[in-house]
Amino acid sequence: MPRSNRPRGQRGGSRDAGEPEIDLSRVFSGRLRTESKRDGLWNVQPLAAASATKYYVCPACNLEIAPGVAHTVAWRADGLMGEANDLAARRHWHSHCWKIKN
């Protein structure tokens, strides 16, 4: 009898009520790093092209970052107003613009 490639059981789609939610901070934490620039410490996280789904404006060159373009997300790691405010003030940069930032 030939093998069936049809998926069996329930996958993806609807989740069982007893299943725990996925902690996305653990998923992204491996790629998150801290960089030191002249103006302080920054949390830096690369964003893959497949994950870039919106338009952004790079704060360095004021040019648009189109959906589907890999880029870098950065926010202060040493802000005075707290971690929540720093995260809310994150900005999307062209990868090259981030590299040449002072």
Image: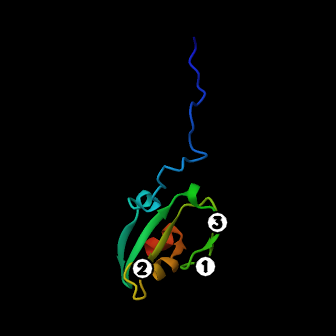
Residue placed at 52% from the left, 58% from the top? 48
Q: Between tags 3 and 2, which lies in front?
A: 2
Q: Quadrant of the N terminus?
A: top right
List the residue tagged with mark 3. 54
Q: In this figure, what is the number of numbered marks?
A: 3
Query: In the image, what residue type sits under mark 3?
Result: Lys
What kind of element bears circle 1? loop
Position of residue 92 relative to residue 51, above or below, is below
What kind of element bears circle 2? helix
Instruction: Please state which of residues 83 and 40 is positioned toward the viewer in this rendering.
Output: 83
- The answer to which of marks 3 and 1 sits earlier in the sequence is 3
Q: Quadrant of the C terminus?
A: bottom left
Query: In the image, what residue type sits under mark 1?
Result: Asn
* Residue 14 picture location, percent across and down: 60, 46
List the residue tagged with mark 2. 83
* Residue 4 picture location, percent across and down: 59, 21
List the residue tagged with mark 1. 62
Position of residue 38 relative to residue 71, above or below, is below
* Residue 13 picture location, percent across and down: 61, 45
The picture quadrant where one finds residue 8 is top right
Please indicate whether residue 21 sits to the left or right of residue 56 in the image.
left
- How far apart in space, not on screen, are marks 3 and 1 (Cα)? 16 Å
- The answer to which of marks 2 and 1 sits earlier in the sequence is 1
- How far apart in space, not on screen, are marks 2 and 1 (Cα)? 26 Å
What kind of element bears circle 3? loop
